[in-house]
Amino acid sequence: MIRAIATLVGVFFVGVLVYSFGTGLVTYLSEPHEETAEHVFHKHPEHYDFASDGMMGKFDTAQLQRGFKVYKEVCSACHSMKYLSFRNFADLGYNEDQIKAIAADWAIQQPTVDPETGEATTRPNIPSDPLPSPFPNEVAARAANGNALPPDLSLITKARHDGGNYVRSLLLGYQDPPAELAEQFPDAMPGPGLNYNPYFANLNLAMAAPIAIDDQVTYDDGTKATKEQMATDVAAFLIWAAEPKLVERRQTGLAVLIFLLIATGLAYMSYRSIWADKKKH
Ligand code: HEC
């Protein structure tokens, strides 16, 4: 008797499950999908072959220096890079004196505490300091940027899918909102203080195009500073910043693979020689 009731209860639950799954499936298949503005207008980053791409890729230090210049002269007005210290710029090919000069001349000083009075104050940067943030705190950063927070850029190429290509495409992707957007999705048009960019996840972002004209910076190596060149160089710099040891990591991986291949070969050969007279083949 109890068994029969238990079976009935079980059958009932299975029935309810099958029924709700079935109706869900029918609605899913029969109703047209609700199109969203992001679905129609969002674009995936354009692919660019960075020098550091691929198994044998290496950073192009001249490009990193150019990208650093773009960061320093343009992006650092709003974006911090708190996981970088001035001494890390040795990787870009700067010597000790150049790094000391870069740190000492940095537009924002290092926050510190006056040892006499305990008051908050600032002092010139030294090579071991992290890059100082352009804003003292988040409230100040938002207040200056229409309530949007400029994210720290130290790890941005890791934090976004296809990071290097994404940053490059985002910087070059500003445009007027397409007429179809206004027709089909008037709610998705950029509001006050927002800018249309199909590479940004929700199409409208608070950052106005930071790279707006050719020759916005003057490169020390004579490279022509087109908008595309500046966007590419700063993206390469941000790829380096997020993983300065990228090239070493790949080289170590390759060495380990080669070692494992040789070790496998040796193991197989010793297996053959140990069993040679037992197997007689
Ligand atoms: C005037 C201030 C300002 C400058 C200069 C600026 N940004 Fe921004 N940036 C912002 C703000 C504000 C946001 C946040 C936008 C949002 O969330 O809508 C942002 C967001 C970003 C994002 C993140 C987008 C995302 O996916 O969340 C990246 C990447 C970025 N900026 C890169 C740069 C680079 C590279 C430069 C220099 C070439 C630069 N920015 C210069 C203010 C600035």
Image: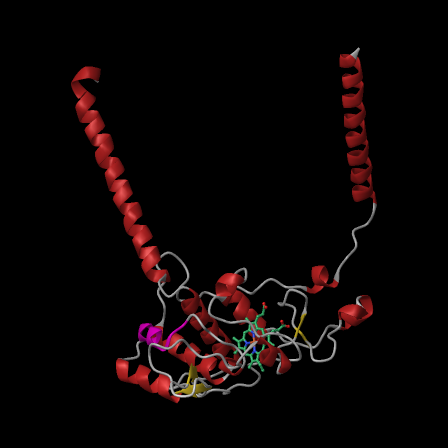
Position of 162 compared to 209: left or right?
Answer: left
Task: Quadrant for the C terminus, please.
Answer: top left
Task: Quadrant for the N terminus, please.
Answer: top right
Q: Is residue 221 in view?
A: no
| Identity of the residue furthest to the front in this view | 117
- The residue at 43%/84% (across/down) is 118
Q: Does 188 sit above or below residue 97?
A: above
| Identity of the residue furthest to the top in this view | 1
Q: Is residue 205 in view?
A: yes
Position of 72 compared to 38: left or right?
Answer: left
**Secondary structure mainly formed by the magenta segment:** helix
Residue 80, image x, y percentages? 49, 76
Residue 208, image x, y percentages? 62, 80
Quadrant containing ligand 1 reads: bottom right
Q: Nearer the viewer, residue 8 or 98?
A: 8
Report the magenta residues as a range: 84-91
